Amino acid sequence: MRSITSLLCALIVALFIALPWAGADTESYKKSHPHMTGHHMMMNPMTGWMNPMMMNSMMMGPAMTGMMNPMMQMMNPMMLMMNPMMMSMSPMMQMMNPAIDGATRAESLDSMMRMMDPKLFLASMGGTYEKREDDDVPNKLPVGKIPGFPTQSFYDHPPNTVSPSISDEAKKNAFQTMMMMSPLSMRDMLNIMTYKLPLEDGVTWEDAVDSMKLRANEVNFKFVGSSPMSKEIEALTGAPSPRIEIFRFCDALVARKILDYMPEFIIFLPCKIAMIEDAQGKLWIMTMDWDVSWLNFAQNPNSHLSKELRADAKRIRDDIRYIMEGAASGEL
């Protein structure tokens, strides 16, 4: 539990470290943000002085900027003093690599993540919690507040409003910094986001596809096409490929509601279920696991979903699992 909690804290810290640098004064940033002029870093790393333009753009007035400048200047020498200490700790930290290897195995991650308790974490941070049943949809977020934790104010966005783009430079800098601090590999993170089932013994590829389509029809999920990627790969390379096929399903009415809430969710639509053959010839069926209950303790009030949208999202997830379970068992 401590390892995972430390990881999450490290990722949060990394984000706060990365974001001030993400808008550095690069040619690509200036071209994509012509209305911004001058230096875009929040703080000058050499002097510790806050950038007044950036502070004002964050709704911080001159008074707040004046208060924070001395504080940041005081922190600069302290950070420089810590560098030798961190360098001396490097050999000791390297000795922890085998422990990290063990802790990040899927079985160990599963056990540690099961032990994580958001209510316990909130209590340990001195926070308060709105008492309610786990299945109840909160009227607003956050349901539990960590004292002093910074987050956005609530914005009442008009339906179907696209958010401003984030530059490639900013995304690259932020995620490179976060990945540098995370012990999890890309495989680990994608594994956490995936729901998958092996096909039962005796269930053929064709059995699974037939069952999937029948169950989709049963729950009013429209089948909107498939992509037999392995056939395309074989046609291009002339060599055999393990079987891969991606099946697409859609509930247009729910999709419209989700896009009204957040148009960027279109990148995940329509819902996809993939069937693949692994290195041992075993057949698997998998999809992205997007569980809206993950948002229950989000500190950002803009992560809130209405009761109606929460119910629709939960039904979609349950229906996808129902379809996949039918494919895995071969039930018609």
Image (cartoon, grey):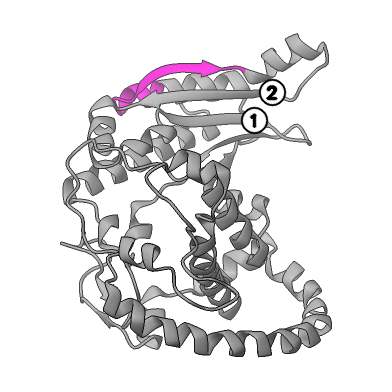
**Picture mark count:** 2
Taking the image as shown, residue 310 lies to the left or right of residue 278, namely left
**At x 64% / y 30%, what residue is drawn?**
276
Can you say whether 51 is above or below 172 in the image? below
**Front-most of residues 300 and 201:** 300
Can you say whether 6 is above or below 141 in the image? below
Amino acid under disc 2: Arg
Amino acid under disc 1: Ile
Residue 243 image label: 2
- CB under 8 Å between discs 1 and 2: yes
- Which numbered disc flags the more N-terminal residue, 1 or 2? 2
Secondary structure of residue under mark 2: loop
Magenta segment: 214-228
Estimate the x, y position of residue 299 in percent, counting from the top left.
Answer: 32, 68
Secondary structure of residue under mark 1: strand
**At x 69% / y 23%, what residue is drawn?**
243
Report, in whole angstroms, how far the alpha carbon at label 1 lies from the one at label 2: 6 Å
